[in-house]
């Protein structure tokens, strides 16, 4: 007796089922993988800025401390960016006529602030306070990486919820003396980070905050 469907129909049906299963699996797993990629987290991607500011030159060569330009990090949630007045404090005498500093001079004389492109940009539903981290022994390099080696600053850390929680669960692994907050190359004595971290955590009264309202308010 002749069948209604050709002999290859069973194989086609099985292939279709497997294909639909893979598509469904990909629809679930795909977004989970994508949000963890450097592309989505914007890690390693340098942004164009209105002024070509080379951190290697200012931090490494000239020895300018992080807090000279980002002084608000010690006293407020927002680290702040230097005003044109701060820049011109040096550049009124150093390279005062450089074409690369034209935007800085224009900002200084017009009073119109420079429009920098934000590199580390957390979602609006996340609350982050720079001052509490800086004053509790979390160094700049812990979150921002070796900016003294960057011609153009880019994001190094994933800034994901899991990354933040890993630190909040065991902050002792990342604490350093306050005097070394802005040091780019400070390292604890070999094998002593855990002991030093516990001592500093007690000294600075560091808490292990992992409840939702710590960051989502």
Image (cartoon, rainbow, N blue to C red):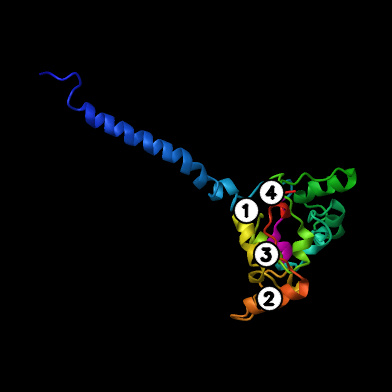
Mark 3 or 2, which is nearer the eye?
2
Cα–Cα span, label 4 and label 1: 10 Å
**Is tag 1's residue or tag 3's residue first in the polypeptide sequence?**
3
Mark 4 or 2, which is nearer the eye?
2
> Is residue 31 in view?
yes
The residue identified by callout 2 is: 198
Cα–Cα span, label 1 and label 2: 24 Å
**Is tag 4's residue or tag 1's residue first in the polypeptide sequence?**
4
Majority SS type along the magenta span: helix
**Is tag 1's residue or tag 2's residue first in the polypeptide sequence?**
1
* Residue under the image location 67 percent in, 64 percent down: 141
Residue 178 x %, y %: 76, 72
The residue identified by callout 3 is: 141
Q: Which residues are magenta?
A: 52-59
Asked if residue 3 lies left or right of residue 172, the reply is left
Q: Is residue 148 magenta?
A: no
Q: Is residue 57 magenta?
A: yes
Viewer-side residue, 104 vs 204 = 204
SS for callout 4: loop
The residue identified by callout 1 is: 161
Cα–Cα span, label 1 and label 3: 19 Å
Mark 1 or 3, which is nearer the eye?
1
* Quadrant of the image occupied by residue 22: top left
């Amino acid at each position: 007796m002749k069948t209604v469907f050709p002999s290859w129909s069973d194989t086609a049906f099985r292939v279709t089922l497997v294909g639909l299963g893979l598509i469904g699996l990909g629809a679930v797993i795909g977004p989970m993988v994508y949000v963890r990629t450097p592309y989505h987290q914007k890690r390693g991607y340098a942004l164009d800025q209105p002024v070509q500011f080379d951190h290697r030159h200012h931090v490494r060569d000239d020895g300018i401390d992080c807090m000279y330009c980002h002084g608000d990090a010690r006293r407020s949630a927002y680290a702040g960016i230097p005003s044109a007045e701060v820049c011109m404090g040096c550049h009124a005498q150093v390279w005062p006529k450089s074409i690369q500093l034209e935007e800085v001079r224009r900002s200084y004389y017009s009073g119109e602030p420079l429009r920098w492109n934000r590199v580390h940009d957390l979602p609006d539903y996340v609350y982050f306070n720079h001052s509490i981290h800086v004053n509790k022994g979390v160094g700049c390099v812990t979150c921002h990486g070796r900016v003294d080696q960057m011609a153009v600053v880019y994001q190094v850390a994933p800034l994901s919820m899991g990354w933040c929680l890993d630190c909040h669960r065991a902050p002792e692994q990342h604490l350093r003396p306050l005097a070394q907050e802005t040091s780019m190359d400070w390292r604890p004595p070999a094998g002593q980070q855990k002991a030093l971290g516990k001592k500093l955590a007690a000294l600075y009264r560091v808490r292990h905050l992992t409840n939702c309202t710590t960051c989502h308010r």
